[in-house]
Structure formats: structure tokens, C-alpha cells
Image: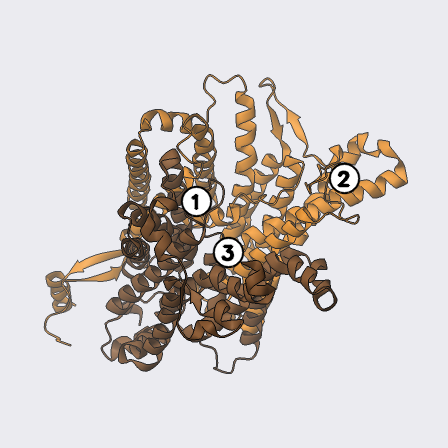
Amino acid sequence: MNQEYGVFTLFLFNIVVYNIPLLYGTVGEMITEKSGSLNLGVEGTMAVGAIFGYLAGNYANSMLVGLLVSFVTAGMCGLLFAFLTVSLQANQNVTGLTLTTFGLGLYFFVGKGLGADWPAMQGAQSLTGGFAARPIPVLSSIPVLGKALFSHSLLVYLGIAIAVLSWWYLKHTKAGLRLRAVGENPGAADSVGVNILQYKYIHLVLGSGIMGLGGFYMALNMGGSFEGSNCWINGYGWISIALVIFANWNPVYAIFGTMVFGFFNVLQVRASSLAYAFPELLGWMSSIPPQLYKALPFLITAIVLIVSSVNKRGSSGAPAGLGLNYFREER
Amino acid sequence: MNQNHGPLFRVVKRENTRWYHLAVSYASAIAAALLIGALLLSVQGVPAGAFFRDMFSLGVIGSKFAYKNVEGFIRLFIPLLITSVALSLAFRMRFWNVGGEGQFIIGALCAGFVAFRLDALLTSLAGESWGDAVWGKLLMVVCMALAGFFGGGLYGVIAAVLKVKYGTNETLLTLMLNYIALYLILFFGETKASWNFFLSTESERPIFATFPAVAKMITLPTPFGRFSLNLSLIVAVLICAGIFVYLKYTKQGYEIAVVGDSPSTAMYAGMKVGRIVIRTVFLSAALIGLAGAFYASSAGTLSTSITNDVGWTGVTVAWLSKLNTAAIFVSSLFLTVLQYGSQVASTSYPTVDANFAKLLQGVILFAVLAADFFTRFKLVGRTKAKRQEVLG
């Protein structure tokens, strides 16, 4: 495969394959945050969606069941978050962090508990087949880019479709407009008759469900093998939270942002082979510590966060009511 | 909207919280968590009773090396206690410092820097034997603690200054700083180079070097056999008491309370809100850095997983305790029992992961967060509300 694709094509290809879960996580968190809730439980939610989606999909030997179960179980995490923070007015930061702790605990408990009974992905034809690449007819024959961008599994296309659809929903539908109003100023939205409770619940569950799909993708991308020490999600949930800021709360920018963050992710793995392939042009890359590449998404996001707060020009997509609970009687 | 038919009940804030509401909510939260835990364990075919017995006894019963278990327990307890108390300081002002992980790491790194460099410096000045003197060890440990304190504090104060000056979201910024610190320690831990004094020179693979003996935390002999007391436990308890007094009886503590209650009130009362926030967050982050330094010194080495998630667990503890310093002492003790206990118990039950404690911890906090609602609010039925309206 290496020779056929060439280093550059393989590089682009990997950016997409390894980082689509970031897109799912980010779009899910964007929908969540647009309703005014900061859910720091992305990592845990993705882990829950990943393990239950994978197990269900494997036992049922069905891709569809896997997708559905990952969406529903992760959505239940969102429901729990909504119940605690919206109905019971619990603090969002604490609830989110607890969701992560709980989700990871559950992930390891279930995985380790199965032990030798852990089902291998090879046993489920539907999962291996469903995750195989489906080249898009005409586009995939474009030289270099065709193989890199248009020859992926259905889940990659689904992720991009969800991102575009979310953008359209937020920007061009009445419900999307109302949702944004809820996130900006719930008191004002309430006064014109928007059902705050309903909007928050629906979108918190929806957002978490989408995160869960990203977890399911990661499970399949890891070949479904459970390791006792490392979670599949491996920090992608946290990067997603960073990416929401980087992409300025816009799902279409999130596609672009995923590619940028993915670029650094892959660079960290591929730097030495790139330096080896183009010693004169890229030889310097092997001397950069790989940890820097890993830290870059967080470093860039920190800078974006600071710069956007220094020049407040109203161009930020951050909802004004982000992280604040809405209590009607204190409106 | 139909004005005549309001909702079936509405939510009203309680004026005062009764202590038995709290007691009942905590007891039921813990009971719920243990029940769910027991259920999950029995699904896996693990005897829940025996597992919990091993867990809550910390494996001390019938063990020849019980003192080792107690020492290990204390080593986990100290960082959690200090971090939780420190976080509660920032939380009191509604400053969401979720950067405990990063501040802990930076504290540990700074302490490690001092351990290696100060030792090298003094060895070149006073010869190999400098560390054997009593003043040597004390000097070293104090210097490490100071380095951790200021390192962590300065790292944490970045977010405070930006928040005060530009309104930068501190939750998200401290979150990002966690990962920057994590990759920094990974960089030192994984880069083999002649300048990198953090790594062991003997090993081919990159491994953190052990600290010189003089940089190991001071331990005090006790009457209980081979058990020796870690000095930093005493310091941690003193810090805990100090913060209690600081918050309750000093002017600065009063300022924190006012700013936390209402920043505008504080402003009108002539308090410099920005300065108070920056000062308090510095103290919060510095104490976490100090905890990092203590832990590194007690362990005698750095590690890429040095935090043991203390920055996250600390948030749980602080919140479980409603930011009350005395309650933090109890909750962090309890959560350490869960953590250390499940580690110990999981060694005899290989199908149970050591992360079982996280699951329990999550359920407990969920239950407390839910029960909290009923201590802060009450539900008023439609008819009763109407009657009150008529009477009012």
C-alpha cells in the first residue's frame, strides 16, 4: 500500500482516517454548547458509546445495531447530564467531569470484566465489512487526492454529512435559530415562548449521541481490541472540546479544524518517515520532539482562546450563556 | 401561554438548609453507589461482600506488610487532600480552576529540577558528603517545596490574570494548560539527550532517574513497628487547618467570601476584585504545585502519570464537601479509601479493574448532585402556591 499511494497520499489519507472521531466529538459538543451547556464529559461519553456500541454491534453482527447502540448509550449520558444540570440545577463543570470519570470507570469495568470473553472484531463480518473503504465512483479516481480523500468507509462520509447537516440546522432552520437563542440568552428566549427545557434536553441528548458515534468509530478503527491500560478514546474527547473553540462553534469550520488538528496528530507519527523521504526539504522535521506535535492542538487553542478574548469584536461564536444554568425565577 | 393553568408544581429556592437533609442525602448517595457497585460485581460473578471487605480494610487485615499498605494509602491521600483544599479556594470565588492536573505536574517538575540541580551544585561546592548532614536534607526538601509552590502558582496565575484583564474563559484555558503541562513532562520523560538530567543515565530506554537520596521526603519513625510517618502528611494537615483559619478569621478570607457571593458588592465596598482573584488563584495553584512537589519527593522520582488524576478527583472532593474545609478532609479520606482499596482488592479479583473506584466515585457524586437539588430547592404544588398568593 505504501508504494502505491506514495508518502504524501498516505499522509493525507491518515489524517482523515485517524481523526474523524474528533469531528464527531466536536460537532456533538457544538450542538451541546449552542444550547448553553458546557459538557466536559465528552471523553467519558465517547468511551461509553464506544464500548457498548462495539459490543452490541459485534454480538448482533450488525453495523446498524452498533451505530444505534453507541448513539443511544452515549445519548443516555447526555440525558443524565441534562437531568442533573437542567432539571436539578447542578453545576455543569462538576457534572461533566464526573461524567468523564464515571464513563471511563464503566469502560474499564466492562472491558476488563469480559476478560477472555472479549469478542474479536474478525468474528463480526458486518463490522469489518462495514468499516471497509467505499471509494466514491468518479472522485476517487482523481490522482493523489482521490485516494486520500474520497476512498473511505461509510462512517467517514457519515461524520462529514452530520457536520454539514448540523451547520445547516443551526444556521438555516427555525429550530436552530431558537436553539442559538437559548444558548445566548435563555431568559429572552423563554419570554418569547421558547420551551427552554425541551430545547436543552433534546440537544444535550442529540449532541452526546453524536459523540458516541465518534467513540464507535474509534472502536472499529482500533480493530476492536481492548487494552487494559489505555482507553480507545485516548484524549480525543478533550481535543474535541478544544476544537470547538478553534472552529469558533461552527460545524463546517470543524471539518477544517479536524484536518488541522489531525495534521499535527499524524505528523507526530509520520515526521520521521517524511524527513526520510524528503531529506532536503523536510529533514528538519525529525529533530522536532513528537510531544510538541501532540501539545500543538492545545497550545493553538489556548492562543485562540486568549486572542479572541483580548479583541472582543462580537465575531466569536461562543454562546453568551455558556456554562450558566437557567433558573426561571431568577430571570 | 395559558395563564390559568400553571405547571403542576414549581421550583422554589429554600431559605435555609437543614443538617439532616444533608446527612440523609449523603448517606443515601453512598448507599446507592455501593448498591450499584454490588450489583455490577455480582453480574461479573465476583462476591460483592468479600470484595468490599478487602476494599474497605485496604488489605491490611492478615497482611504481613500492613505498614506498607498504610504508607501507600497516605502517599495517595496527601496530594488529594492538598489539591482539594486548594481547588476549593478558587471555587469559592467561582473561578473554575480545572487545571489542577497541570499545576500538579509543573510543581513536580520544578521540584525535580531542584532535586537534581541543587544536588549537583552543592556537591561541586561542598563535596559528596553535603547531603549527609541534617541541614542538607532539610534544605533540599524546603527548596523543592518552594520550587513546586511557585512553579504551580505561576502556571495557574496565567489564567487568573487573563480572566481578570480580558475575561478569558478560565475553565477552558486551564483545561488546555493541563495538556500542555502533560506533554511537557512527557517530553522530559521520553527524550534521550545529554542535557536531559531528568533521565536515568544507566538505562538505554528513557526512564526517569531516581532523585538523589537527599531529595527523598523526610519520614519520621513511629512506635508502630516499621511504619514511618511521611512528614508531608503533617504539613498537609497543617495546611488544611491553616486554610480553615484563613477563610474564617482573616480579612483576606472575608474578601474571598464577598467576591464569591457577589463581585459587584465587593467592588462597591471598595475591594479590588481583580487583585483578590489573582491572589487567591495564585495561592490555589501554588498549593497544588506544592502537592506535586511533595508527591515527587515521597515517590523519589518523576513519572508521566504522576498526577494519578488528582486534579480531576480534587474537583469531585471539593464539590462533595460543598467547599467546606473540614468536610474536604473527610471526603478526600473517603475517596482515597475507595481508590486505594479498589486497587488492593482488584489484585485478588483479576476480572475487576482498578478503575472500579472511578465508577463508584461517579455514582456517588451523581447521587449527591441530584440530592443537592432537594436541599437547595423545594417543590411547591399548584394549589398550595395559589393559596399562598391569595394570602400574600
* Labels 3 and 2 positioned on one and the same chain: yes
Q: What is the crowding at mark 2: few (fewer than 14 residues within 10 Å), some, or many (at least 20)?
A: some
Image side of residue A91 versus residue B200, left or right: left
Q: Chain of mark 2?
A: B
Q: In the picture shown, does residue A121 fall above or below A166?
A: above
Q: Which residue is mark 3?
A: B98
Q: Residue at x 41, y 57 (%)?
A: A42
Image side of residue A215 versus residue B91, left or right: left
Dot in front, 3 or 1:
1
Q: Which residue is mark 1?
A: A225
Q: What is the crowding at mark 1: few (fewer than 14 residues within 10 Å), some, or many (at least 20)?
A: some
Q: What is the crowding at mark 3: few (fewer than 14 residues within 10 Å), some, or many (at least 20)?
A: many
User: x and y percent of residue B344 in the render?
Assistant: 47, 29
| Local secondary structure at mark 3 | loop
| Local secondary structure at mark 1 | loop
Q: State how far apart marks 3 and 1 are (Cα).
A: 32 Å
- Report the number of numbered marks: 3
**Letter of the orange chain:** B
| Local secondary structure at mark 2 | loop
Q: In the picture shown, does residue A147 fall above or below B180?
A: below
Q: Chain of mark 3?
A: B
Image side of residue A68 versus residue B54, left or right: left
* Labels 2 and 1 positioned on one and the same chain: no
Could you tell me the amino acid type at mark 3? Val
Q: Which residue is mark 2?
A: B201
Q: Which quadrant would residue A85 be assigned to in this image?
A: bottom left
